[in-house]
Amino acid sequence: MTIQIKFCGAAGTVTGSCYWIHTPNCQFLVDCGMFQGSKTIKALNYEPFPFDPTAIDFLLLTHAHIDHAGLLPKLVKHGFSGPIYATDGTRDLLSFMLPDSAYIQEMEVDRLNRRNMQRGKPKVEPTYTRKHVNQCLTQFRPIEYESWVDLELVRIQFWNAGHILGAASIEVEVPGNSLESEPLKLLFSGDLGPDHKAFHPDPDAPNGYDYLICESTYGGRERSDASPKERRSLLAGEINEAMEAGGNLVIPAFAVERTQELLLDLSYLLNSGDIPSVPVFLDSPLAIKVTSVFSAHASELEDIEGRPAAFNHPSFHFTETADMSKAIARFTSGAIILAASGMCDAGRIRHHLKNHLWRSQSTILLVGYQAEGTLGRMLEQGKKRIKIQGDEIEVRARIRTLDTYSGHADGSGLVKWIEERMPLKHQLFLTHGSEEAINALQKNLVANGFPSGQIVTPKLDDEYELSAAGSRRVHKEAVRRVDPAMIDKPDWHNDLAQLTLDIRSRLDHAASDKERTEMLLKLKHAFDNSKHQKKKRLH
């Protein structure tokens, strides 16, 4: 018996998680996530799926993050009508996250269409609307952890992944061709949390699979194993330094899990007096709604002793309306501002960054993964000039990072989790990571005795046959939607934005208008020469 798996996302990149599995009896997906990062990668969200959505029988969802679930409404829009199997926590989170995603897309497309009209370009449509979200949410079917569910065509079991509320690794058994033949056993890791993460037990699952598909997000990174007390101490240090600098502390925070972890720790620090009594603004309507989901699931969460009030404090101010958000600008010092999105690519955080990045007294604290091509990654890399919503801004604020809030296991944690799943009969597929992270994880696994011949690192749109005898790549000349060399790297849009900033900076610092004119003439000559050389090559 042979099945096929196609890596339709999260292959050579961290986002767009989507695996298409077709067996002799059915077709199903594991995840259907949105691509994030450079414009080249995000353009995949608007392209047709590399499969027929009407032919998909069901979908298995590991967790609620948008890079794993963000294209579910698009799938429904294009004809998928089957059930979506996920935990209660995942469904409850997505009941807020997917409508928010649709709203953001509708607003961004509306803004883009206004610009397109001015430029004489055709209108574009959002990937999906709130109508498609509402239909999608009716197709969810709740799944309990550690309980087999027979879907007739396959059997599935969800295991705690320790990543966010409701996150799961998914075990799949595909029956053999006859009663005597053994089923093929697969495990999809989903995103794995680190050991001792706030709210959740350590990730777990059995061992002895035929195939293992494992994430590699932090495959090349090592973090100190900070206890909750140490984590809060590090956060307190960053807050106290920011307050002493005389400005505000701005934290771009993911609406799901990261915000709630920060609220929990801020509450502890304020109560203990380890930080001054300052106002804390949570400026994200989605994060506020998600916090209500965490409160509703308080009995399932560790570290808060079942207390929904753990996310509340007299110093916390939840700003839901646009007017309330704008009013925060009156505070130029002595405040902590948490706002989404965590990679600074959308949402209210961009307004706060515009208001603070140019202030030398302000501090920006990055507390999560920053994908290549995002504004957050540019700040992390130390860019001194950036663009936000068309405006050029000189970065004078202190840019700090705090790695103790990551929701992902680091390189050693991933190696440990994979080793605990041994023995593995056939292949380990490393996905959901940059080329650098995947190569580092592969090297560490081999150094720890894992056979190199069992490790496969698929590229986007690669397809493999899986059988009881092992895997085989099919369609070696796969039609690729994106050149693998362009995945998880800055694209020409990023290069153009940086070049524009560099030119402007050079012009601003020129000694005279004459020097500026000479610089612009040199640029024009360079372009003219490039066009001339191209014509010579063509002839």
Image (cartoon, helix red, strand yellow):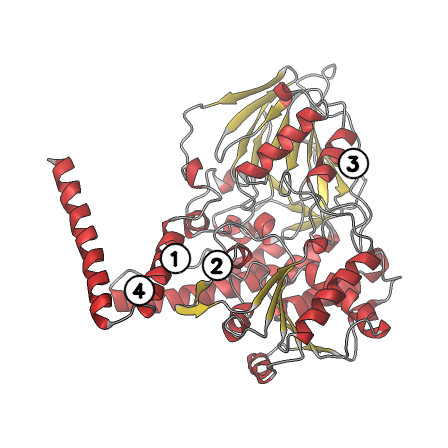
Question: How far apart, in angstroms, are the residues tagged by discs 4 and 3?
Answer: 50 Å
Which is more N-terminal, label 1 or label 2? 2
Residue 101 quadrant: bottom right
What amino acid is at disc 3? Ala
Which is more N-terminal, label 3 or label 1? 3
Secondary structure found at label 3: loop
Which quarter of the figure is the C terminus placed in? Answer: top left
Question: How far apart, in angstroms, are the residues tagged by discs 3 and 2?
Answer: 42 Å
Q: Which residue is mark 2?
A: 383
Expressed as whole percent of the image width and height from the top left, the position of residue 479 reads 40, 32
What amino acid is at disc 1? Gln
Q: Are marks 2 and 1 in contact (CB under 8 Å)?
A: yes
Q: Which residue is mark 3?
A: 205
Residue 498: mark: 1
Which is more N-terminal, label 2 or label 4? 4
Check disc 1: other Cα within 10 Å, few if <14, some if 14-19, many if 20+: some
Please name whichever residue, 436 or 281, is drawn nearer the observer in this view of the structure. 436
Question: How far apart, in angstroms, are the residues tagged by discs 1 and 3?
Answer: 45 Å
Expressed as whole percent of the image width and height from the top left, the position of residue 163 reads 72, 49
**Which mark is in front, 4 or 2?**
2
Please name whichever residue, 152 or 60, is drawn nearer the observer in this view of the structure. 60
Q: Is residue 61 visible?
A: yes
What amino acid is at disc 2? Lys
**Which mark is in front, 1 or 3?**
1
Q: Is residue 28 visible?
A: no
Question: How far apart, in angstroms, are the residues tagged by discs 1 and 4?
Answer: 23 Å
Secondary structure found at label 2: loop
Residue 159 shown left or right of residue 373 in the figure: right
Q: Which residue is mark 4?
A: 116
**Which mark is in front, 1 or 4?**
1
Q: Are marks 4 and 3 in contact (CB under 8 Å)?
A: no
